[in-house]
Every structure is written in C-alpha cells, then in structure tokens.
Amino acid sequence: MASIQTASVSALAYLQRKNKITYVSLVVLLSVFLLLDYIPGYSTWVTPPVALFLGLIFALSSGQAHPKFNKKVSKYLLQYSVVGLGFGMNLQASLASGKEGMEFTVISVVGTMLIGWFIGRKFLKVDRDTSYLISSGTAICGGSAIAAVGPVLRAKDTEMSVALGTIFILNAIALFIFPVIGHALDMSQQEFGTWAAIAIHDTSSVVGAGAAYGEEALQIATTIKLTRALWIIPLALITSFVFKGKGQKISIPWFIFFFVLAMIFNTYVLGTTETGAMIGEGINSLARKTLTITLFFIGASLSRDVLKAVGIKPLIQGTLLWIVISVSTLAYIYLF
C-alpha cells in the first residue's frame, strides 16, 4: 500500500515538473486531430467536452503551465471563434428562434442580481464585492461580466479571482451535465438552446453545450447568450452609479457586434451564392475547431490552487444561484 502511494506521489511530481512540455504536447495533439476532421470519412474524437475534460485533468494533476499565455489566448480565441460562428448563421432565422428567450432575459438578469444579493449578503455573509461579482457573472455572461464590472466596483484581485474561480468551476460542470439533462428531459433544440443560454454562465460553455446538443440548439443558444451579454454595458453603468465609482473605464465586449456583422454578411452577401455559402461554412467550421481548443485552455486554467482559493461560501452562493436560475428557466420554458 505504501509503495503504491509513493509511486503515485512520484508520478504526480514528475507531471508537475514536465507540465510545460505536456501542455504544449496536448495543444499540438488536439490541433492535429481537429484538422484531421477535414479528411473525408474521418470523424474526430476531440469534442468540446473532451477538450475541456483534458484541460481539467491536466491542470488538476500538473498545475498551470504558461498561465499568462493560457489566459490571453483563451480570451481572444473565444472571441474570434464566436465571430466565426456568425458566418454559419442566418440573421432572420436566428432572431426568430431566439425571440422567446430574449423576452425572459430581461426578467432573469434583474431577478438573478436580486436573488444573488439575498443569498450572498443576507444568507451566507459573503463580502460585498465578491458576492456582487458572482451575481453579475451568473446573471449575464460569466467571466466577461466579472471582468467588466470588477474595475467599476474597484474590486481587489483576490475578490476577482474568487468570483472567476467560482464561475469557471460551475461552467466546467455545466458543459458536461446540461446536454445529459436535456436528453433525459427530451428537450427540443429550441428549448435546450434557450435553457443553456440563460442558465449557463460563460459564452464558451453555452456554445460548447449547444454544439454538443445539436445545430439548431447551438444557433439559438449563441444568439440569446450574446444578446444577454449586451447587458454588460447597462450593468456596469448602474454599478458605477450605485457604488459611486466615478471615472472608471467600462469594458465593452466589442466582439458581440462583430458577431452580428458576421451574421448580416453571411445572410445578405455570402448566403446569396453557392460559392459564398461554402466560404461561410468553411469559416464556421474553423471557428468550431478553435472553440474546442479554447475549452482546453479554459480547463487548463482550473488548477488545485484556484479551487483552494475559491472557498466554500462563494462556491455555495454560486451553486445555489445557478440552481435557482436553471430551475426557474426550465419552469418558464415548460409552463409558458
């Protein structure tokens, strides 16, 4: 028994020493297999959940490798991927399919912020800034909302890290369990896309879960989520007013507007010819692959140090708030 434990510790230590080499090797391996998907008759095993899972296993066993690079690449690659997905979507069809979810978005954003305040501040006694950041991330679009609201709130780095860690943990769980629950409940593509867009925090996991469920679910989820993400701007302004944060710069998610432009261009320019449609499909296909790699980077950032830093109370707030928004969204979908 002692020898097995010693061997496990030695193996873990070896992985931690070689984590940078392992990190680069995994990125190259995933990229190669994704590109092999272009070969006729070949179907890649590298799906969004698999990429996220590999990233998580790597980070939990070996720790973070190239953390600054990982953070920067995952941020920008996600934005480029989302814009690329716009080239595979029709503007009119997407707006029609996402209309119902957009109506509920207004209610859910306000409701989530209020419930988050009650759970975090009144029930769990989480500090003000951390509680507010977790509520903001749950209400709108995860890490992007936290990154936008944090400077306005003048949040400390530790508070930002705890809020981001909480959201990333729940994001990783959501990407795995939402498609399973959707199939168990026999949800339609429309229903699942709406549910995922509202109940899952971050755009990356929403797109990943939508892609895992089906093409229509992906389009609906992406449209509703990015519409929801536009609430970052009024939320940051309201935060500045409520917490008296004058002169603070507001981070606007410009990639959302480029996503809309890509949809418009695909609908009215590329979609009018067969060649144009093929170009749009090619860009969309590449975007799906870069999104899959992005999920590996996101998973690779969730090390044991991040898990320890989160603490139990913020995680409980995030989990309870997530359950409330998930169940209430399901009730809205089935009852209305």
Image: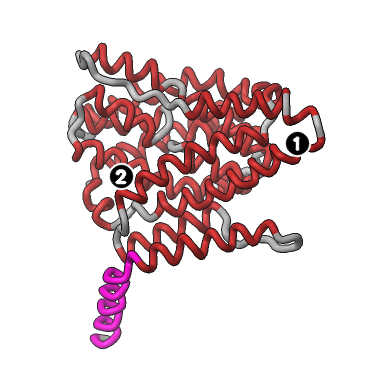
Q: Which residue is mark 1?
A: 277
Q: Which secondary structure class fits the magenta region best?
A: helix
What's the amino acid at mark 1? Ala
Front-most of residues 127 and 270: 270
x, y percentage for residue 186? 66, 43
Query: In screen coordinates, is 78 left or right of 101?
Result: left
Q: Identify the residue at image location x=68%, y=41%.
A: 215
- Sequence-wise first label, 2 or 1: 2
Residue at x 44% of width, y 66% of height: 25
The disc label shown at residue 59, or none: none
Disc 2 versus disc 1: distance between alpha carbons?
40 Å
Work out which residue is located at the far front of the displayed protein and give it: 275
Q: Compare residues 258 and 297 and report the one nearer the observer.
A: 258
Residue reaching furthest to the top:
241
Quarter in which the N terminus is drawn? bottom left
Report the side of 149 relative to 326 (left or right).
left
Where is residue 123 drawn, in percent x and y?
24, 31
> Which image quarter is the C terminus in?
top right
Q: Which residues are magenta?
A: 2-20
Does 13 appear in magenta? Answer: yes
Q: Which residue shows up at 36% across the image and 47% down it? A: 169
Quickly name the residue at label 2. Answer: 165
Task: Report the amino acid beneath label 2.
Answer: Gly
Magenta stretch encompasses residue 166:
no
Residue at x-position 47% and y-position 45%:
174
Q: Is residue 78 or residue 214 the one in the foreground?
A: 78
Mark 2–mark 1 CB contact (< 8 Å): no
* For residue 283, side relative to residue 315 (left or right): right
Looking at the image, residue 262 sits to the left or right of residue 169; the answer is: right
